Amino acid sequence: MEKEKTYVEDVDRELYDFRNAEKDVWKVGEGLTPAIVETISREKNDPEWMRAFRLKSLDIYNRTEMVDWGPDIEGLDMDNIVTYVRPNTKMNVDWADVPEEIRDTFERLGIPQAERASLAGVGAQYDSELVYHNVREEVAAMGVVYTDLESAMHGPYGDMIHDHFMKLVPPTDHKFAALHGAVWSGGSFVYVPPGVTVEIPLQSYFRLNAPGAGQFEHTLIIVDEGANLHFIEGCSAPKYNVANLHAGCVELYVAKNAKLRYSTIENWSKNMYNLNTKRARIEEGGVMEWVSGSFGSHVSYLYPMTLLTGEGARMTYTGITFAGAGQNLDTGMKVVHSAPKTSSAITAKSISKDGGISTYRSAVVMTEKAAGSKSSASCESLMLDDISRSDTIPAMDIRTSQADVGHEAKIGRISDDAIFYLMSRGIPEADARAMIVSGFADSVSKELPLEYAVEMNNLIRLEMKGSIG
Amino acid sequence: MSEELLKIEDLSVSADEKSILRGVDLAVGRGETHVILGPNGAGKSTLGNAIMGSPAYTVTGGRITFLGGDLLEKAVNERARDGIFMSFQNPLEVPGLSLTNFIRSAVEMRTGQKVRFFPFRKELLRAMELLDMDPSYADRDLNVGFSGGEKKKAEILQLLMLKPSLAILDETDSGLDVDAVRTVSRGVREFQKDRESALIIITHNAGILSSLHVDRVHILVDGRIVAEGDGSLVDEISRNGFAAYENKA
Amino acid sequence: MKINTLPAPTWRWLRMNQGETDFDAGKGGRLLIAERRGDWTPCARDFSAVKGSAGEAFAALAANMEEKPLALSASGEALLRLCWRAEEGAALDRVRIAAEPGSRVTAVMDIAAPEGCSGEAGLETLLLADEGAELTLVQIFRVGAEGRSVVSVGGECAKDARIRLIQLVLDGRETDLGAHVLLRGEGSDFTARIGYRANRDHRIDMNYVVPHEGKRTTCDIQAAGVLEDTARKIFRGTIDFRRGSAGAVGAETEDVLLMNDGTVNQTIPLILCAEEDVSGTHGATIGRLSEELVYYMASRGMPVELIYRQMALSRLNAVAAQIPDEATRVAVAEYLNGADFDTDGTTV
């Protein structure tokens, strides 16, 4: 008799896979030259320092070697990537002013509805530019700034941006950081003044519609002393046959005793090369919380990094990666403890199926200055068939004896014992398997606000039947 | 009371910022056997650990004097050297360190003298025999692969070898079968023999006490000593439980 | 040359992807057979497919040696004790051992040098464990504070074969070691018990790689060590479940005690998995002793300093106790006794 196995369905991407015709857009040519960078800079009305910064970054890009340790990115040919695509609209503060087709896109993604229901502010980026940015009046009244980076550069926060922009992730960090420095466009600037708690989340949503294009948004968040913020980032794109590139950059500054939670649901299409860089610096007593769900992309390199630079700074990372057919998702985290009594707690999960490859890659570093610090990591991988792949590559570099470092990893399939136990309580095998898989993802979904947890559960829709092998 | 060994005054202790002991007084003289009885969660083990100096507990108030000196100022190993011993509920396992070498180190710390191997070994094996311990355990790694009962016996073995002036037995009888309880009691009686050393027995059931001489019983409920009496109090608790004392706290 | 390369590289800034050594030797001939028990015969088997843990550059260096490898095959119950005799300068020797079907073979390699000798020991050891054979390799490194060892171990297991490895690094200015053991046959097993200590500015570089190819293959790697002063150490451990290794189980654990600030402790335990029906785990505990353990030991009168000394020693003792050959066990105990630490666990 054929053994029945649960078939865990692919992430259902239909919801995200609609494309709009490119019309009335303005874009630069393919590839990367000083002329193109100059053009972007001129188009964006950069201050002079930013223009120089872009050109310097381009120079670094040209001199920096391609990464040689992660998933294959040979399919990504920079000569074919369009680095700047401007939709035919200015930035708006009212959805009614957003051109219908773009507004329709975000309506279908549920962004305006979510804004009304549960968000303190929303930014929406379409290709290379923000098309909408708004923040609730009462939040703005507390002094919270949530706007696009370009206009902020020319306003009262210009110096602050100058002092923080690509200081955590310098263009020399790696080749795609240099690329980002040269052609970045769009993204958000958030400033939360001292002592202010933003009760409900801010959200930025990034949509890449143009085929063969790159999206290079920059997110800069400064949470000042004692302040508190939850920021949500969502991303998606329709699928094309040509490679798209996402090389965004997120820089987060968490001041003394401040707290920031940064949640991401990434659902790029399967032609996307997602080479995103995220980094946070946490000062004394500050708290950083990362929640990360990676479902989309053809190839991902994604490792949020936390620098615990102040005494007692803490961070948690909760992440899940779901790699299906045609996907090679290399995700994880990095943390550097360089002050006393800092702590990090890491929970990472991954699921591989249908030939998908998921890799958990991490680095936990404790310098000599990190006396009394703690780090604990738990990482679990689930293999749903024998044509997929799941690798775990955790590095630890510990240089203080006053450390307490623990690391645990587990890899395997759904346990027969667990199935047996549930079946012994009268639950049919198929249900038992589904319960275990959704339970596996539960530790991440419970960290998300309810509507995003629902979205995530939709993303991992678990189908009961189907017989493979 | 005979010469005073241990004096606890108005002791308050907390763990994880939670207050557990709230003003405990206790005096123990040489040669006396005291019993601390109380329901689960009353703070009995906390009291033992506070005397021993566990880093998991914080003394927030009061004093403990041992042999006239301030005990709270002393490091754990200094308390041991001065003659305090506590049997652990969950003794730790140390691969690569034999039971013999461990006890030998401990005896050297207690006496400040190099141990002469053969007389030491002879005494160790004699004590193991009294405790029905297989001699092969002497060369096994400390507590590694020991059953729960063997671990408890190994604790009593240390008690007999170290000859402390104050021994605290923390739930030494819990989880043991009838035979093992009898064996452990035999070890404890052996320790009581010299009438010089004092004993604090922490327990929530009276089983281990039936064959032991008891001088004084203290009922600990909710971080406070709510009743005290002689050995007859043990029988009363055996019959009626703690219910009558629980609202006195 | 590059040695001890990680099978799946990671960020370059961590400097963990491979080790680097300037070890170079033009000759061998420092290996002596100290004892031979049981049925040993010269071995003409082909070891060319067996990969060593140090990697290709080291293998190429070894292949250039004029001296022929010591190649022996054993059946039944057999023991071989080899001594690596230190002199000034570098030398590289090669050993090949085949354990015939159903045999119980032990090979002990004592890599020793008098204190102060700056001799450099190169050793390439390749092993074949035939069906149902159990082959135990013991390597003791005690080349003094100035000596250096570069060791590559490679092995392959046939059906139901087992390779056990015990490596104990007692000292040495630089030690490169590891093992690459291919579990080819169904039901084969690799077990490693590694103990090390390093002080001063000494360096230990380790690389363990276990590809599981056969069904129901198992491996268990346990490393325990102590670092002091400004010693540096890297532990690479890779469990590689290849397609077809259904039912395989792999585990690795590392436990590192850091005696003071200023040591550099790097650990990178990989699990690579291309098979559904497997179970792989790893765990690492790094830093100081647990508060509970220190409390327990202190309650028996021991000051913290002594507890750390004692625990450092007990880690090595626990590995040494696994050595099946008594003569070697005694030699190790004596060495531990003489070198700064006190073996019997009493006051230092």
Image: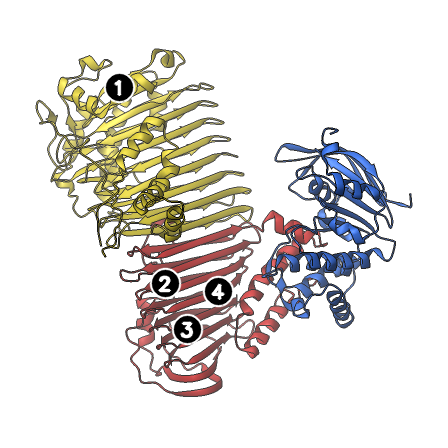
Circle nearer the viewer, 1 or 4? 1
The disc at residue A113 is: 1
Q: Position of residue C170 (x, y in %)?
A: 54, 67
Residue flagged by tag 4: what amino acid is it?
Answer: Ile
Compare residues C297 and A14 and report the one nearer the observer. A14
Image chain in yellow: A
Q: Which residue is mark 3?
A: C122
Residue flagged by tag 1: what amino acid is it?
Answer: Gln
Subunit of label 3? C
Q: Tell me whether the residue at label 2 lies in contact with that at label 4, contact meaning CB atoms closer than 8 angstroms.
A: no
Subunit of label 4? C
Q: Which residue is mark 4?
A: C194
| Element class at badge 3 | strand
Circle nearer the viewer, 1 or 3? 1
Residue at 30 percent of width and 33 percent of height: A456
Q: Taking B21 as reference, is C2 left or right? A: left
Q: Taking C221 as reference, is C212 left or right? A: left
* Residue B22, visible in the rendered structure: no
Instruction: Tell me if residue A262 comes above or below residue B52 in the rendering.
Output: above
Circle nearer the viewer, 1 or 2? 1
The disc at residue C209 is: 2
Image chain in blue: B
Spatial CA span between label 4 and label 3? 19 Å
Compare marks 4 and 3 and give the one earlier in the sequence. 3
